[in-house]
Image: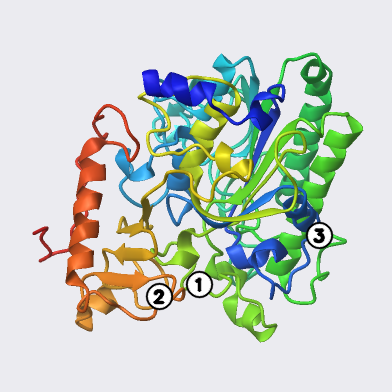
Amino acid sequence: MILRLLTLLLLPHLVMAADKPNIIIVLADDMGIGDLTPGNPDCKIKTPHLQTMADEGIHFLDAHSTSAVCTPTRYGLLTGRYNWRSVKARGVLSGTSPHLIPADRPTIAHMLRKAGYTTQMIGKWHLGWDWHKDGEKIDFTKPVNNGPDINGFDGYYGHCGSLDMPPYVWVDTGKCTAVPDREEGVTKKQDPYGWYRKGPISPDFKIDDVLPHLFAKSVAYINEKAPAAKEGKPFFLYLPLPAPHTPIVPVPPFKDASGINSYADFVMQCDHHMGQLFTALKENSIDENTLVVFTTDNGCSPEGNFKVLKEHSHDPSGGFRGHKADIYEGGHRVPFIVRWPKGIKAGQKTSAIACHTDLYPTMEAITGQIRQDVGGEDGYNLVPVFNGESTTTGRNTLISHSISGHFAIRQGDWKLCLSAGSGGWSAPRERDAQKRGLPSMQLFNLAEDKAEQKNLVETHPERAQELLKILQSEVDNGRCTPGSKIPNDRKVTFLPKGVTIE
């Protein structure tokens, strides 16, 4: 407790001098680190608004989602806790899955509400909520239970799963805005980019309009809350986007604007809407004291059509190996830009390792709250890095997770993948790698081999064992930060068959 009080008192003066900022976290969906000009000098997609955001804030060059897929990443970002500690061991939820985060699990929204913030979620939830069901059939006239409102949000507006997962229904803080009147879907054969699974859809749910609609809702929320924000009542807006995930449906003037393909067009559209968000902040005279985070949930999906992107010399993974779903860097190394004119010096780039879990303790520090044992157990405060006073957050390790539940642990430049293959969708897939007799673990030195091509596990077995022991300790402690030991929500196993810790 004494250490936490000292940490609070010694927060850098730059942050303490500012009033509590409004906070907006934008989480794009299936956008790779190489898809934005700030993270990739060879990027062939124009993203001027996000480039300006990076120029006016701080850009993290070594930032990571906790997982290489949607649902678990969202869990990690909101709770500040590694997703694999939850009951969800692998994969993602559907559009009809029950809620994942218990009401008593602290989230960023809970924590910020305690600090006096109004809190709102607008967008793709993908953490489950409880539809009212008569047997297997959803009754859309009945209230939705256990949505984002039990996880700290005063209100929410969005859809339950990914935009290619039915039902296609808007839910406004527990109430469906309209009852589905038909079933709708598009096959991949009909549209290789714009496909979505067939299911119930409401008359007010227009697939092509979902992205602009959510930004319009967000701008309206900013307009509504700005007067109170200027009077000392800040707001928190969590804006998880459904794009550029499938269905990839850019609208004019972005359709065909990239000269590459629909995916690149859709990334450009996301960038345009970010510009609208900043315009709203400026027009409401709250831009200076609004902290905006832009990041993504995982790497680019193969649905973006890597073959076509490569033909145009564009690499969504920016030279890193793999993509969405994988344990390799392309699966979980993500864009991470933070802009706050009143609290962050412009034009900064940092090589400090960062993780989505770090947002929880960072917002805790910025709002002057004392660190608690529960909540943000796997996160580190980024404020010293924001202020340019440090190149590290105190984070000594990073644990990553693939769609199939495979682990990787990193310490410094060394990364140990507990898989024979990608642990995801890129070659070699796990079963193929095992059939080929590849080693059951992969050890890389990222400083010398950023593309993870040279497996050093046989030449540096002692390093692999060191990392295994660290991973075991962090699993057993229920946290990677100092504090009381906390149980995981399930029995967590990670060792490949035949591997032991010596």
For the residues bearing labels 3 and 1, Cβ distance under 8 angstroms: no
The residue that appears at 26% across and 29% down in the rendered structure is 486
- Along the polypeptide, which appears first: circle 3 or circle 2? 3
Q: Which of the two residues, 342 or 453, is positioned nearer the viewer here?
A: 342
Q: Which part of the image, by quadrant, shows the C terminus?
A: bottom left
Query: What residue is shown with label 3?
Result: 48
Q: Nearer the viewer, residue 197 or 322?
A: 322
Q: Secondary structure at mark 3?
A: helix
Q: CA distance from mark 3 to mark 2?
A: 30 Å
SS category of the residue bearing label 2: loop
Label 2: which residue? 452
Say above or below: 415 vs 129.
Answer: below
Q: Which residue is mark 1?
A: 320
Pick whichever, 445 or 219, lies toward us: 445
Q: Is residue 411 left or right of residue 167?
A: left
Q: How many marks?
A: 3
Please state the horizontal and vertical placement of residue 417, each as a whole percent of the image: 30, 65
Left or right of 14, for residue 30: left
Looking at the image, the residue that sits furthest to the right is 283
Nearer-the-camera pick, 160 or 441: 441
- Residue 411 placement (x, y as % from top left): 35, 57
CA separation in Å, label 3 and label 1: 23 Å
Looking at the picture, which amino acid does disc 1 mark?
Answer: Phe
Seen at 21% across and 80% down, the residue is 435
Residue 70 visible: yes
Q: Earlier in the sequence, mark 2 or mark 1?
A: 1
**Left or right, residue 393 beside residue 410:** right
Q: Name which quarter of the figure residue 232 lies in.
A: top right
User: What amino acid is labelled 2 in the image?
Assistant: Glu
| Vertical position of residue 283 compared to residue 252: above or below | above
